[in-house]
Image (tube, rainbow, N blue to C red):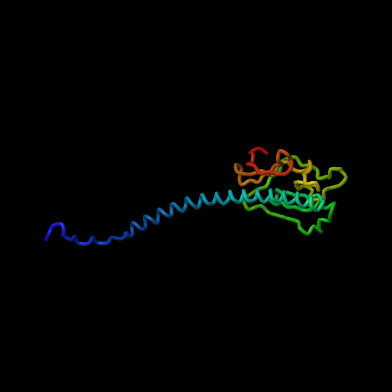
């Protein structure tokens, strides 16, 4: 036989040993722990962003309803319950007859804060109460011309923890509200 035509016996097929499989599974488990912890913070951040956008959307809706219905609307904020909502000012229309009131509760783990300094909920003519269900609630009052008045809160903070949060604040031109990163001082 010619040396170059010599056939080698086939190499035996070799699979993974049990120890190698256990080692690979352990590495996958360790990687999964890191992925799950980072994904948790990702979803909490998404909840914060969603809540801020939902509240901003509610300000646009309040402006639209105030203009279209010719009635002042109150976007109220209840920090104690982490709730907020929208209703027609009850002195202009009966609050029970507002067929489209809106109420939201913030996602678990999020807190709502309003700027300190409570403004007395009285109309711009100082002749009537604004008709809030709870006079201690903070609010933004949208007038029928689409603007918000000076009795409105100046800042609403939505916080995930002490370091992370977003604020809803009036735009510099005072035509609406905008979202910005929360400051650490209230």
Observer able to see residue 81 = no
* Left/right of residue 127 with respect to residue 103 in the rendered view: right
* Left/right of residue 85 with respect to residue 33 in the rendered view: right
User: Where does residue 18 sit, x and y in percent of width and height?
Assistant: 33, 60
Residue sitting at 11 percent across and 61 percent down? 1
Q: Residue 144, relative to residue 100: is it above or below? A: above
* Left/right of residue 167 with respect to residue 11 in the rendered view: right
User: Where does residue 81 sit, x and y in percent of width and height?
Assistant: 70, 51
Q: Nearer the viewer, residue 49 or 164?
A: 49
Residue sitting at 54 percent across and 51 percent down? 40
Q: Residue 116, relative to residue 24: is it above or below? A: above
Question: Which quadrant would residue 22 be assigned to in this image?
Answer: bottom left
User: Where does residue 39 sit, x and y in percent of width and height?
Assistant: 52, 51
User: Where does residue 87 sit, x and y in percent of width and height?
Assistant: 77, 53
* Left/right of residue 176 with respect to residue 91 in the rendered view: left
Residue sitting at 79 percent across and 57 percent down? 98
Observer able to see residue 172 = yes
Residue lying furthest left in this view?
1
Question: Which quadrant would residue 19 be assigned to in this image?
Answer: bottom left
- Figure quadrant of the C terminus: top right
């Amino acid at each position: 036989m010619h040396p170059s035509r010599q056939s080698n016996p086939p190499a035996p097929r070799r699979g993974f040993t049990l120890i190698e499989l256990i080692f690979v599974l352990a590495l996958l488990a360790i990687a999964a722990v890191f992925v799950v912890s980072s994904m948790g913070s990702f979803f909490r951040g998404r909840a914060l962003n969603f809540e801020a956008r939902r509240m901003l959307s509610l300000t646009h809706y309040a402006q639209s309803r105030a203009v279209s219905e010719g009635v002042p609307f109150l976007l109220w904020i209840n920090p104690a319950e982490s709730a907020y909502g929208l209703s027609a000012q009850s002195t202009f229309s009966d609050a029970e007859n507002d067929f489209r009131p809106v109420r939201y509760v913030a996602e678990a783990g999020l807190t709502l804060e309003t700027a300190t300094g409570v403004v007395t909920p009285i109309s711009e003519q100082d002749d009537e109460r604004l008709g809030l269900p709870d006079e201690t609630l903070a609010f933004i009052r949208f007038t029928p011309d689409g603007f918000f008045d000076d009795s409105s809160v100046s800042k609403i903070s939505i916080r995930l923890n002490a370091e992370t949060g977003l604020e809803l604040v009036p735009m510099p031109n005072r035509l609406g509200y905008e979202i910005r990163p929360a400051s650490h001082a209230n």
